[in-house]
Amino acid sequence: MARIFSLLLKLVSALVLLTVLGVWLTYWLAARSLPDYNADYEVSGLSAPLEIARDNANVPHIFGENDEDVYYGLGFAHAQDRLFQMILLRRTAQGKLSEMFGERTLTTDELMRRLGLYEAAKASVAVQSPEAKAALDAYARGVNAWIAEVNKGALGRGAPEFFLFPTEIAYWQPADSIAILKLVAVQLSDQIPNEVLRARTSLLLPQDRLKDLMPDAPGTGTALLPRFATLFPEALPSKQPSGVQYALSPMPDNGMAGASNAWAAAPGRSATGATLLANDPHLDFSAPGAWYLARLELTSGGVIGATVPGIPGVVSGRRERFGWGITAAYLDDADLHIEKQNPDNPKEVLTPDGFKPMRSRPSIVQIKDAAPVTLTLNWTDNGPVLPKTAFDVDTITPPGHLVSVNWTALVPDDRSMTALVALNHAGNMSAALQAARDFAAPALNLTMADPDRVQMKVIGRAPARDPRHQSQGRIPSPGWIEANRWQGWRDFDALPSFTSGPDGIIGNTNNKTVDAPFPDHLSYHWGDTQRVQRWQRLMQAREVHTRESFIEVQNDVVSTSARTLLPLVGADLWFTGEAAPEGTVERQRQRALKLLAEWNGEMNEHLPEPLIYYAWMRALQDRLIRDEVGPLADEYTHVEPLFIERVYRDIGGASVWCDVIQSAPKETCTDIARLALDDALLWISENYSSNLESLRWGDAHIAHHDHPVLGKVPFLKWVVNIRQSTSGGDNTLMRGVTAGDGPEPLANVHGAAYRGVYDFADPDSSVFITATGQSGHPLSRHYDDLGELWRRGEYVPMSLDPELARAAGVGMTHLVPEK
C-alpha cells in the first residue's frame, strides 16, 4: 500500500510539474509577441529616420520627414498592436477564413467570394490618386517591416493566436487596405436584410399592418407599394430559413448595422466663441475593438483621431484648425433582384432583351483538415448571385429563380481611399468637401467644424433609380425589368448638405435627414427615430455649449422611448385595483408599476426600472405580433417604439394588433399590457430576482467585448473577453444595443466604441476614448486599460503637442533605414 501511495504521489507531482511547465511555456511563447515599445529597428523601405512616441494611453504619435514615412510608421504601429485582427479582416474579405478555421467558416467564405469584394478591392487600386497609392504602398511596407521583425527575431509569430492557428502570414498589399475599408461599408449597411425581412413580412400582413410593424420614419408619406406576393406569386409565405450559420461573418443582422452620433456648434452657440464638435461612431463590440487611436504628423500638419487597423489614415478626428466626424447616412445603397432562370438553360437569366448567359468563373476554397471545395461564381447584369442561404433569401426565392445584389460596396472603381487620404490633409471645409467627392462606400454624413463654422454633408455614391421602380428599393424586385435597374449615380452636389449659421447647431443620430420623395430620397430605412428627440432637447436646453456639455450629451442615458411608451401602455394600469396580498402576481405587478411610475426614464446601470421597462416592452411586442406573423416574430427581437406607439394611439386602426386572433374573446390593449407585464416579471424572477427593488439594469445590460475567435473557447474566454456593466439602451444617446436573442438577450453588444469631443477654442483640450484598449494582445496591460474609462464616460487627452506626446509615455520606438 505504501508503495502504491508513493507511486501515486510521484505521478500526481509529475502531472502538476508538467502542468506548471506547460502553463509557463505557453505564457512565455505568448509573451514573446508583446512588442517592445522602446526598441530601435533597422528596417527596409524607409527613406529617413522615424520616431513613434507612445503616450501613457499607448497612443502612437508618429513623426517622420515625409508623408510616406509617416504612413509607414502607422502600418508598423498597427501591426505591432493588431496584427491578428488585421490578418483576420483580410482573410474575411478574401474569403480565406477556412484555411485557418476549417469547415465552420466555409459558408462565410463562399458568401464573400460570391460577392467579389476582394476582387473589387484589387481592381480599385489602379484608380487611386498618386498620393493615395503612395500612402497605401508605404503603409504596406510598414506592416511588412513588422512581420519581417517578427520572423527575424522569433517574436512569438506576432500574436498569440497564430500559435493556435499556424498558417502562413502573407505580406500586406495595398488591395488589403482597400478591402478592409470595403468591409467597413459592409458592416455599416443592413439594407439587404431589411429588404428580405420586409418582403417576408409582406407575405403575411396587409399593407396597413406592415406599415405598423415596419414603420417609416416620421416625415413625408410613402406611396402605396405592391406586396411582394404581387411581384412574385410563386413565393410561399410558409417557407422558413434554412438555418445555415455564417461563422465570423461581417454582415450585420437587421437592425444591427453601424450607427453613430455627431453634432457641432457654431461660434454663437459656444461659450468660448469657437466651434465644438462631438462624434461617437457605433459598431459591434469586440476585443480588441474596431478602432485604434493614432496621431500622424504629416507635412500638411498633425492629424489625430480614430483609425481602423489595416487602413492608412484617420477616419474620424481633427487637425489643428479643422475636425470631422462621421455617422452612417443610412442611404439605400443596395438592392436585391430576383433573377428568372431559363427553364431550358439554368445558366441563363432573363434580361430586358431576353435570356442572357451569366458571367461565371471557378474559385477554389482551401479548407483546413478537409478537401478543397470548388465554387462556380456567377454574375448577372445586376451584380453577383448570392448563395440561397445568405440573408435568408431562400425564404423569398421562387422556384426557378436566383437572387443577385447591386451594392455600392462592390464597385471596382472605388476611390474612397483617395478621399480618406485627401481628407487627412484637408485643413478646411472646402478642401474636405473636395476630397469627399471621391467617396463611394460607405455612405456617411460628414460633420465638419473649423474655428468659425460648422457643416454637414452626405457623402458616398447614391444609386440613381427610375421613378417607375416597382419596389422603390424596399423589397427585392424583378431583375429583368429595366425600370428596376440602377440608372447610374446621383450627382454629388445633389446630395443633402446642411450649413449652420453663426448661431446654429447641426447634428445627426442616424435620423431621417431629408423628406424628398422617391427617387430623390435617401432611404426609407433609417437608424433612429428616438435618439434625435432627446438630442434636440438637450441642444436647445442651453444657450451656449462647452466641451463638458458635449461630453454630458454623449453620455446621456435618458430614454425618450420609455418616457413616451410607459404612460401610453400603462394608462389603465397605474394605481388601479385594491392592494393585493404579498406573494401574489397582482402584488408583484403593483410593485413594478409603482417603481415605473416614479421613474424618469434614465437607463442607469444601478437602477431596477430599466430592466423592468425593457423586459415589459419586449414581452408586449412579442404578444402583439406573434399570433399575426407566427415564427417570423423571432426576427423582431428588438423593441420598435414607433410600432408600440402606433398600437396604443390606435394610429390607422393599429389597435387591432391587441386582439388575439386565435381566441374567441376580444382582448383590449390594456389586457395585453397587463399580461405582458406578468410575462416580464416571471422572466425577471427566473433569470435575475423576484425582489424588484434589488434589480440592477447593469446586471443584464453587460457590454460584451468578445474575441471573435477565442471568445467561446473554455478557459481562454475568461482571458480574452472583456465584460462591463453599462448604462444606456437601444434608444439612448449613449447607445447600447441589446443582443435581442440568445441566453442573454439584454446584453449590450453594439454601441459607441469610439468617442471624441473637439474644442477649437483650445484644440489640445480635445478628448477621445475607445471601448477597450490599444493593444490586441490579451497579455498586454493596454488590452483593456481604456475600457473602464469608457464605461464611466471618461476620456484621455487628444493633443497634438509633441512634447506632451513624448513626456511620461510608455515607449519611444525609433526606425532607421536599413543600411
Image: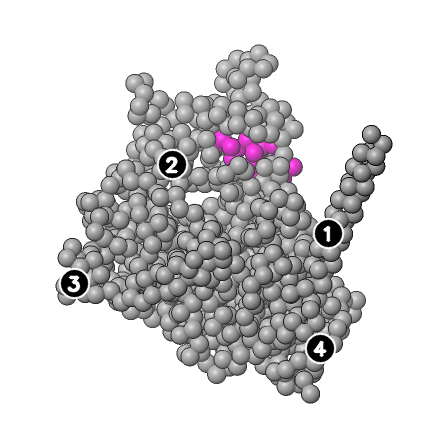
Q: Are marks 3 and 2 in contact (CB under 8 Å)?
A: no
Residue indicated by mark 1: 22
x and y, in percent, of residue 502 in the image: 53, 66
Label 1: state its secondary structure: helix
Q: Are marks 4 and 2 in contact (CB under 8 Å)?
A: no
Residue indicated by mark 3: 355
Residue indicated by mark 4: 41
**Which of labels 1 and 3 is toward the front?**
1
Q: CA distance from mark 1 to mark 4?
A: 32 Å
Mark 2 crowdedness (10 Å alpha carbons): few <14, some 14-19, many ≥20: some
Label 4: state its secondary structure: strand
Q: CA distance from mark 1 to mark 3?
A: 64 Å
- Residue 66 magenta-drawn? no
Sequence-first disc among 1 and 3 = 1
Q: Amino acid at mark 2?
A: Ala
Q: What residue lies at 32% left-to-right and 62% top-to-bottom?
A: 376
Q: Nearer the viewer, residue 458 or 482?
A: 482
